[in-house]
Image (cartoon, grey):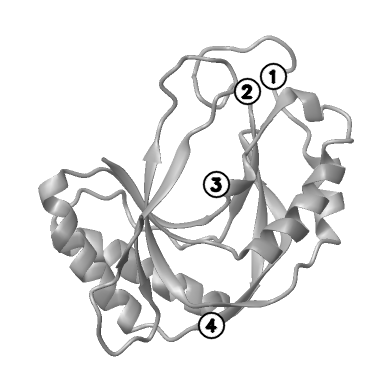
Amino acid sequence: MRLFAAVLPPKDAVRELGAAVDELHRLPGADGLRWTARPGWHFTLAFYGEVAEETVPELSERLARAARRTAPFPLALHGGGHFGDRALWVGAEGDVPALRLLADRAEAAARKTGLPMEVHRRYRPHLTVARTRASRSAAPAPGPASVDFAAYLSALDAFAGREWTVGELCLVRSNLPQSGVPGEQPRYETVASWPLGAADGPGTAAG
């Protein structure tokens, strides 16, 4: 199964960001982007890729330990950025060092489990809201070779969502599109979550 560790924003934060993203849809060129679905909005902490089912219990145990060692912390959606001409994202403010620490611990959990991970890079909090239509493939796409995100970034500079307390670490399964229908997006399923700073407890399995 294809898994990653994540922090999920609460519903009110998603609603606030949704209103801001609706405004971005009015900007020139918005129809040329693939906008991510709101139910899937998240901060990826560590991406694990394909994980064998028999490996999940050990990974989960180590993630539970990482959650227990991390106290709850404040966070808010704020501003934006982009990765080249591939993706547009919203950033975070608040206790970003605590978010980075949790990301480092989620990555360390995978390494100790024996999962192959990419070379460690400093964690940059980002919640992807749009991708270019060519970002899934190296094949050239019709139309402009690059996307100018300047207007989108200018609009996001003024965005500051309400603060919430991050209280859990989630293990999420990514179900890639199967139908081949253009525009179909991955489906995300929370398979387990663990409260931050909890003294004990194995975690909560999703229904």
Q: Is residue 9 above or below residue 25?
A: below
Q: Nearer the viewer, residue 169 or 100?
A: 169
**Secondary structure beneath disc 3?**
helix
Q: Is residue 201 left or right of residue 177?
A: left
Crowdedness near tag 4: few (<14), some (14–19) or many (≥20) residues, C-alpha within 10 Å: some
The residue carrying mark 1 is 145
State the count of labels: 4
The residue carrying mark 4 is 73
Callout 2 touching callout 4 (CB < 8 Å): no
Q: Nearer the viewer, residue 163 or 84?
A: 163
Crowdedness near tag 2: few (<14), some (14–19) or many (≥20) residues, C-alpha within 10 Å: some
Q: Earlier in the sequence, mark 3 or mark 4?
A: 3
Amino acid marked by disc 3:
Gly
Residue beneath the point at 64% across and 66% down: 92
Residue beneath the point at 26% across and 66% down: 108
Which residue appears farthest toward the front when viewing the image? Answer: 207
The residue carrying mark 3 is 40
Residue beneath the point at 47% across and 38% down: 187
Q: Nearer the viewer, residue 16 or 85?
A: 16
Amino acid marked by disc 1:
Ala
Amino acid marked by disc 4:
Phe
- Give the spatial CA distance, label 4 vs label 1: 41 Å
Determine the image quadrant of residue 33.
top right
Whether residue 42 is visible: yes
Callout 1 touching callout 3 (CB < 8 Å): no
Q: Nearer the viewer, mark 2 or mark 4?
A: 4
Q: Quadrant of the N terminus?
A: top left
- Give the spatial CA distance, label 1 vs label 3: 28 Å
Callout 3 touching callout 4 (CB < 8 Å): no
Q: Is residue 58 left or right of residue 169?
A: left
Amino acid marked by disc 2:
Arg
